[in-house]
Image (spheres, rainbow, N blue to C red):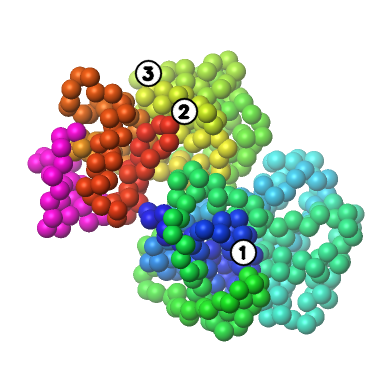
């Protein structure tokens, strides 16, 4: 994945520009791409099968643009996007929306027909805040009225909010709605908080870039693509963003896209035990896990957590380090040392400054780690990757292909088309170990165990060998990711 590749923001109309603008303001050095399906908007009034098909077509287009992250700005698309499997990391506005809402006594949620019917916000908020009174109001005509700049927009809005009395906050569950924020402020009294997730979505993107060390190094011109009415879109976008925008017309409809992006419903086969004693964090992770299709069991004690792992044999364990009862590292050691549970994947959660715990956890057999604070969406992208690696297994191979490179295991040989790369035995050993464990963080000691060199070698020599590998293979070879304070990881994207 190229760090200078653009971040894509996808929506069915101009509403995505509210998220685009928030990301642009928070991360001015990032390269951005906006895709708006004006031809078929609003998605909120479409059936689920159509929304999935349109989303797959957008993913196909964005994959060809070599983007490094896809942000679903559309709330309607976000209700289905967690089920789609795509080689590019994806984030949606749904989780950011949940984090935007505080424990108000009475809140109204305004959204499209499809978003409100999904009940996703109402279910999630009831789990977090059981005492909160929630009024969900479908507004099937509002997004289109905003898109077409209907002169009666204030009257349309007033009709939808008429039933709302004595509320503390209004959550705008459609990215179009913030474009008429002044109307909402006029129609509601000053004591009513008007919430939209655009800024929180931008913060989620920033967290993703930090977690994956993917900040752009070169600023390029932002790109705008639409499926229709490009001049109209460019004019509106120029006003919203305060700069001149030029939009390119594209056709998203292509044959055979449906079979390319499969839908994975994992709830029947992926059970997760999360051992975490901080109730707020546990509730957030559990909610995102259920949104992503997993069954998540929360246990707040290390001793009880290990007993549950032995008893229930989950598909994966999410494990905090600092726990009452028994330390998370001890729990990890027992899980990996027990023949009945040693093959259960473990992901460690660690606070900043606990790199030594991360290193110890990985060397005890943990399959990955996620540092706190973290995005639940990022956590479950790691969960999906770890579960996928477990299904693939570690079958012996004689050669492996990544990008245009071929690593010949038997002949200790690396080549790119007709070009051969002379590697030292140590460099080859490191590369083979990383490639064989793609997507998994390996500590320096773990890499060191596969190198045949002098007995006096120390783990920091690994950094020298990695630097030599990168130099030999050139700047386009960016698949070895440095995980600061821990070790290295070979990016899974190289194998797509």
Q: Nearer the viewer, residue 227 or 433?
A: 433
Determine which quarter of the picture holds residue 280: top right
Residue receiving disc 2: 355
* Residue depicted at x 57% and y 84%: 231
* Residue depicted at x 60% and y 66%: 16
Residue 283 at x, y percent in the picture: 64, 37
* Membership of 264 in magenta stretch: no
**Image quarter in which the C terminus is found:** bottom left
Secondary structure category for the residue under label 2: helix
Q: Nearer the viewer, residue 44 or 325?
A: 325
**Range covered by the magenta-colored residues:** 397-426
* Membership of 412 in magenta stretch: yes
**In front: label 3 or label 1:** 1
Residue 402 at x, y percent in the picture: 25, 51
Q: Is residue 71 visible?
A: yes
Q: Nearer the viewer, residue 445 or 308?
A: 445
Q: Kindly identify which numbered label has been placed on residue 65.
A: none
Alpha carbon separation for disc pair 2 and 1: 35 Å
Q: Is residue 224 left or right of residue 426?
A: right
**In front: label 3 or label 2:** 2
Determine which quarter of the picture holds residue 461: top left
On screen, 418 above or below 422? below
* Marks 3 and 1 in Cβ contact (< 8 Å): no
* Marks 2 and 1 in Cβ contact (< 8 Å): no
Q: Residues within 10 Å of mark 1 (few under 14, many from 20)?
A: many
First in residue order: circle 3 vs circle 2: 3
Residue 86 at x, y percent in the picture: 42, 56
Residue receiving disc 3: 337
First in residue order: circle 2 vs circle 1: 1
First in residue order: circle 3 vs circle 1: 1
């Amino acid at each position: 994945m190229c760090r200078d590749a653009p971040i894509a923001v996808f929506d069915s109309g101009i509403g995505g520009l509210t998220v685009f603008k928030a990301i642009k303001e928070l991360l001015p050095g990032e390269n951005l791409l906006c895709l708006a399906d004006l031809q078929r908007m609003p998605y909120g009034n479409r059936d689920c099968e159509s929304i999935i098909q349109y989303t797959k077509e957008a993913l196909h287009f964005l994959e060809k643009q070599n983007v490094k992250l896809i942000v679903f700005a559309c709330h309607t698309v976000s209700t289905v996007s967690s089920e789609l499997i795509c080689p590019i990391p994806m984030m949606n506005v749904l989780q950011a929306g949940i984090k935007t809402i505080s424990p108000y006594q009475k809140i109204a949620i305004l959204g499209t027909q499809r978003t409100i019917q999904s009940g996703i916000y109402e279910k999630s908020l009831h789990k977090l805040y059981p005492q909160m009174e929630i009024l969900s109001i479908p507004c099937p005509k509002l997004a289109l009225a905003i898109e077409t700049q209907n002169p009666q927009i204030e009257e349309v809005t007033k009709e939808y909010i008429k039933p709302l009395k004595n509320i503390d906050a209004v959550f705008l569950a459609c990215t179009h709605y913030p474009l008429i924020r002044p109307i909402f402020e006029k129609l509601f009294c000053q004591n009513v908080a008007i919430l939209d997730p655009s800024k929180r979505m931008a913060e989620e993107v920033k967290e993703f870039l930090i977690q994956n060390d993917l900040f752009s190094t070169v600023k390029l011109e932002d790109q705008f693509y639409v499926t229709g009415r490009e001049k109209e879109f460019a004019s509106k976008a120029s006003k919203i963003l305060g700069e001149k925008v030029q939009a390119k017309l594209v056709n998203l409809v292509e044959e055979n896209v449906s079979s390319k992006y499969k839908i994975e419903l994992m709830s029947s086969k992926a059970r997760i035990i999360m051992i975490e004693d901080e109730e707020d964090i546990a509730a957030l992770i559990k909610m995102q896990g259920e949104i992503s299709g997993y069954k998540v069991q929360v246990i707040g004690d290390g001793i009880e957590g290990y007993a549950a792992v032995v008893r229930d044999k989950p598909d994966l364990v999410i494990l905090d380090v600092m726990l009452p009862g028994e330390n998370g590292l001890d729990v990890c050691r027992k899980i990996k040392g027990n023949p009945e549970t040693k093959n259960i994947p473990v992901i460690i959660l660690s606070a900043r400054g606990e790199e030594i715990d991360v290193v110890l956890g990985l060397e005890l057999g943990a399959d990955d780690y996620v540092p706190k604070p973290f995005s639940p969406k990022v956590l479950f992208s790691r969960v999906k990757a770890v579960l996928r690696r477990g299904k693939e297994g570690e079958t012996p191979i004689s050669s492996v292909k990544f990008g245009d490179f071929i690593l010949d295991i038997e002949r200790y040989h690396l080549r790119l088309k007709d070009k051969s790369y002379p590697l030292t035995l140590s460099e080859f050993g490191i590369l083979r170990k990383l490639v064989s464990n793609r997507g998994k963080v390996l500590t320096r000691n773990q890499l060191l165990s596969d190198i045949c060199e002098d007995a006096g070698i120390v783990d920091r020599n690994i950094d020298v060998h990695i630097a030599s590998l990168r130099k030999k293979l050139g700047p386009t070879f960016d698949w070895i990711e440095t995980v600061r304070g821990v070790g290295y990881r070979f990016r899974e994207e190289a194998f797509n």
